[in-house]
Amino acid sequence: MSKHGRILVAMSGGVDSSVASVMLHEQGYEVIGLTMKTWDYASSGSTSKETGCCSLDSINDARALAVSYGFPHYILDIRNEFGDFVIDNFVDEYLAGRTPNPCVLCNTYIKWEALLKRADKLDCEFIATGHYANIRKQDSGRFVISKGKDENKDQSYVLWGVSQENLARTKFPLGSFTKAEIRQMALDMGQEELAKKSESYEICFVPDNDYRSFLRHQVEGLDEKIGKGNYILSDGTVVGQHQGYPFYTVGQRKGLGIALGQPMFVTKIMPESNTVMLGTQNELNSSTALVRNVNMVKYETIPEPIEAVTKIRYKDAGTLSSIVQEGDIMKVNFHHEVAGIAPGQSAVFYEGNDLLGGGFLL
């Protein structure tokens, strides 16, 4: 009988989830490893060698580690569920003139649900992942996510959508460690190749991070259906033509294919007229934001305005703001202007290191 019970660990084959599984094994949990096959590059028309969490090499690495430590390992094919939800949403968001956040959707609706469903079948009380974040239970009974020790690797931003029910069964073993410490642990385990594994910061299903080619492969005849459109300024002046509105995002500066004598940014996308608005840095700034599909984590609701640090993208340092919940919408008033609020991206609210909640920018 194990010391702490049975736990299902999501293993991608990378250093983080591998060390997490060994850490829990050595703490006395009865570990079961699970690698989820979410995507393959052939489905996106790519001839590139598969890399990352869905590649055959990564799956084999995860299995080899599990075998070496004597715990079971399974592979779960969730390509259909992943494609039907995450990929369809990714394409639909760009066609709606928004910038999608696939990692949040995958965590919220696919990975946690798939893990817990399999955990129930395997009589596992808990699941664990290699995310750099912490979790605790408050006196109120609510589970709170907080930032990981490593500020550069903190992944709490992509976890705002995980429900209280799912958080109650979740463990993040790496939250109190830095990436350097995890790599050293891998070396101490005798896993030199694992410790040296590089990381991918690309979207797992977009080969070479080229989302435009991916969209063209997913939507047959996309260029012909959309066609070229106008670049305009805020006063409506037409200043040139673009390749089609789905190929641009708010805040974009490079790759516009137009020179206007000063740095210009995408400030607004209007899919109904296939129009992309350009403006200066100042025109990209905003002091307010509205957020939809809000999931509260630390508190159930916040009927009165409270101060929070709001992040509008993953690598954003965050901006002090006043937030107030108005029905299904969170209204954010930034204490100073922020640049590049992109509809479709996540806005995530923090109170100190604690995750208050998050949602999608309108």
Image (spheres, helix red, strand yellow):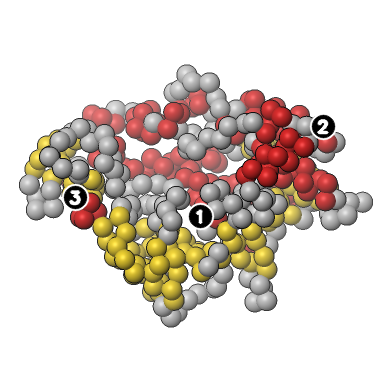
| Residue depicted at 71% across the width and 29% down the height | 192
Give the mark, 1 or 3, whose residue is nearer the N terminus: 1
From the viewer's perspective, tell me whether residue 27 is left or right of residue 253. right
Q: Local crowd at mark 1 within 10 Å, few (<14), some, or many (≥20)?
A: many
Amino acid tagged 1: Tyr
* In this view, 31 is above or below 138: above
- In the rendered structure, the answer to whether residue 207 lies left or right of residue 336 reads right
- Residue placed under numbered mark 1 in the picture: 157
User: Among all residues in the image, which is located at the extreme top?
Assistant: 47
Hey, what amino acid is under mark 2?
A: Ser
Residue 218 visible from this viewpoint:
no
In this view, the residue in front, 227 or 235, is 235
The picture places residue 31, in percent across and down from the top left corner, at 80, 45
- Residue corresponding to mark 3: 280
Q: Gap between marks 1 and 2, in whole Å? A: 33 Å
Point 33% across, 48% down: residue = 98
| Element carrying mark 1 | helix
Q: Pinpoint residue 298: horizontal percent, then vertical percent.
A: 56, 69
Residue 336 is situated, as x and y percent measured from the top left of the image, at 31, 66
| Residue linked to disc 2 | 68
Q: Quadrant of residue 219?
A: top left
Camera-nearest residue between 197 and 46: 197
Mark 1 and mark 2 lie on one chain; the one further toward the N terminus is 2
Q: How far separated are the C-alphas under marks 1 and 3?
A: 28 Å
User: Which residue is rendered at x = 32% and y = 59% of the image?
Assistant: 338
> Up-down: is 210 above or below 28?
above
